[in-house]
Amino acid sequence: MKGSFKEEVMKYRALIGLIIFSIIISLLTDRFMTVSNILNVLRQTSINAIIAGGMTYVILTSGIDLSVGSVFAFTGAIGAYLIASDTNVFLTILIVLFLGLLIGGFNGVVISKGKVQPFIATLATMTLARGATLVFTQGKPISTGASENAEAFAKIGSGYLFSIPIPIYIMVIVFALAYYILKHTRLGRYIYALGGNEEATSLSGINVSKVKILVYMFSGVLAALAGLILTSRLSSAQPTAGSGYELDAIAAVVLGGTSLSGGYGNVLSTIIGALIIGILNNSLNLMNVSSYYQLMIKGLVILIAVLLDRKH
Amino acid sequence: MNQAVFEMKAISKDFPGVKALDHVDFRILRGKVMALLGENGAGKSTLMKILTGVYQKTSGELFYNQEKVEFQGTRASQEKGIAIIHQELNLVPELSVAENIFLGREPINRYGKLEWKKMWENAGVLLDQLGMHFSPKTLVSKLSIGHQQMVEITKALSLNAEIIIMDEPTDALTTKETENLFRIIHQLRNEGKSIVYITHRLEEVAEICDYATILRDGKLIGEYDVKEINQDKIIEFMVGRKLTEQYPRVDCEIGRKVLSVNNLSNKYIKNISFDVFEGEIIGIAGLMGSMRTELAKTIYGFYPKEEGRIFINEEEVKINSPELAIKNGIAYVSEDRKANGLILSLSVKENMSISSLKTFKCFLSKIDKKKEEQVAHQYVDQMSIATPSIHQLVKNLSGGNQQKVSISKCLMTAPKILILDEPTRGVDVGAKKEIYHLINTFKQKGMCIIMISSEIPEIMGMSDRILVMHEGEISGVIHHSEATQHAIMRYAVGLKEENK
Ligand SMILES: Nc1ncnc2c1ncn2[C@@H]1O[C@H](COP(=O)(O)OP(=O)(O)OP(=O)(O)O)[C@@H](O)[C@H]1O
Ligand SMILES: [Mg+2]
């Protein structure tokens, strides 16, 4: 059973778009297609991609998670504080990830048990977590300090393994896992089902609340993981970190072709969406485009990509 | 004078992997009711969607009043005086009945302001004609599917079309509503309007149709004068072979008591008590709004119970979610496959296995896809589901085949107690028989079956005992040997015991 050529093209349209896009960029600037720059792009993209991985799950269930940027900042700040007060690196990682799970779980419970619309529920959490970050940091950056512990912690975001930055490994592992769950497990099937028709899914004997809570927990823990990476890389946490990251993550998901109304899409194309945004940022920097214009161009690219996708 | 208002010539339609129509000719005669018949997936709906411009044909020609036409969408055909009532409802649930009827054609005054009063009045008159007594201001989402269907019909009639196409309109209607509809159809025919009537209820054909066009597997079998062809012949043409008796009742030994419902009450139902035994089929009859579906969904844990207890095998069970119901061996086939029976964005296989994925688990909680596909194939064969592959999206199947997928899903959970809510709605004669046969097989294996149906012959033909409901209560219980249409109807309208 082989699909027609057109169907194949449709299936890989995000990837094809990415390749064409990269070719255009490398024609425009010769500083793009170098090994070090590509690794650089991948490393920069990893943070958005990891957040977008969780966002894909949420969007597939026809939900949305606006709180990821704030969760990113809050957990990052807690992480920085723990390291600065000489907490063991592993313990810090565990605490931070657990915190992400907890906040995500909170979102999930409010949405499923409290029957609040995801947009509203996560908007509230977004504000709440941002406020908590500002209170916790007193509005000032928290440095992880210069201890041995802090240096070990810094490896997560800025270390290398076989001359490839660690965050790239983390991204690959996260997506491998996310792909596996979605494609091969019951939970994955339920996520698609829930996005397709909630009532039918519930009548099919699936605990819809549980699926929702798990999905928001996944989004929360990945936002925390991304926060950890950035805090580690900068050796400090900024109280305003991650603002607007929820929109970048949503953009990556949508660029990958996942439907905002749920039910259709997959997580591998999200990585491509994130890469498109990452390459765009990188190449505009390489070409010395002012950051004001960068935003406008980014907006336009997203608009055009989504419009092209609408045709189908 | 047999003049064709509309003619379709050598129409073909290809979908990926499916030849839905293969050189089909079809004509609509002025002032006649043209039946369009065929098994599930024969291509009836597709042919009508091509006629009205929902789909574009792969090849062939369309003539309207001898003139060649092409419609690029329903709007274009509507403007030419062709209305269609689709098999799947196309209403906006959040809008009122009146707004739905006049959607896109709302009456406005000189300043562009909506004339609500006029809209309500006009809608009220139309509804009255069909004998409907709900207010035009009611939200569509608050109506039962049967009433929603009536709204669709009202909408089509309000267009004052020359040709009205009805795709299984009586599917969700009660006897009374069906009578009203037939009255309207007669009236339209007398006014010289033409009607295309798609149905699986073949007794309706003789009652209101003039000609019958029969399709099989996307090919035209022929057009016949209804006066010259009987029901058996129609079935033979449809399925390509002879079918024997419709309701193959089997009597089996009644075993232990399996399900016992005691004084169940909530906001829909009052004081419901009944038992079901191994190898028994309990039919639940009643008029629309008698809360049969609500009862089923309460037992199934979808609606909360307020009072009452449920026992399975003499042990009390607390079922407050469908998940627990399935764990306790109860399965429920929904009456409305599109709204809540199926997940249209998933494939045939994925829909079938969704309730029983736990049984396909292997290492690392991976779904055992090989086994899953094997079982899906088995059901596709067993239920004769017409689909190019188990990976086809369910939304691309014909209505009847969707119903079979919906039933397969429940059977896959290997239930002890199977609740079927209108199990043969929209299913063709051949498949109906297959489903009855399957139900009987399960009965013989000792399963308890609760079957809700608005088709009284079906209830009478299949059930061992019949519960009749009226306004959320059981108004009567009839043993199958004493069941008559009359007795069922008496209880259904709430009349108590007849004096003997
Ligand atoms: N959009 C679609 N994509 C792919 N296949 C389709 C599509 N629509 C219909 N089909 C296929 O075309 C065939 C004819 O379907 P159609 O809906 O016309 O059947 P039908 O005669 O109306 O059946 P039923 O009585 O069950 O409603 C079926 O095999 C169906 O699976
Ligand atoms: Mg049909």
Image (tube, coloured by chain):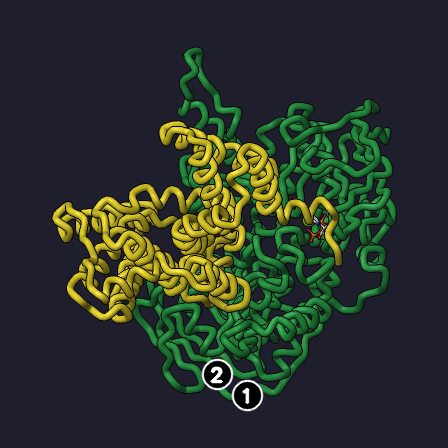
Q: Residues within 10 Å of mark 2 (few under 14, many from 20)?
A: many
- Determine the colour of chain A: yellow
Give the percent coordinates (x, y) of residue B146.
53, 49
Quadrant showing the C terminus of chain A: top right
Give amino acid for label 1.
Gly
Q: Does mark 2 have its CB less than 8 Å from ligand 1? A: no
Viewer-nearest residue: B196 or B60: B60
In the rendered view, tell whether residue B12 sits above or below residue B68. Answer: below
- Determine the colour of chain B: green
Q: Residues within 10 Å of mark 1 (few under 14, many from 20)?
A: some
Q: Chain of mark 1?
A: B
Give the percent coordinates (x, y) of residue A47.
38, 52
Q: Residue at x 65, y 28 (%)?
A: B78
Q: Chain of mark 2?
A: B
Quadrant showing the N terminus of chain A: bottom right
The image quadrant that residue B318 belongs to is: bottom left
- Residue at the spot of label 2: B258
Give amino acid for label 2.
Val
Q: Residue at x 73, y 37 (%)?
A: B50
Whether the residues at callouts 1 and 2 have beta carbons within 8 Å, the answer is: yes
Label 1 – label 2 distance at C-alpha: 9 Å
Give the percent coordinates (x, y) of residue A240.
23, 44
Q: How many marks?
A: 2
- Residue at the spot of label 1: B255
Viewer-nearest residue: B478 or B157: B157
Q: Decide if residue B238 is on the left or right side of residue A220.
A: right
Q: Is disc 2 placed on a helix, strand or loop?
A: strand
Q: Is residue B471 visible?
A: no
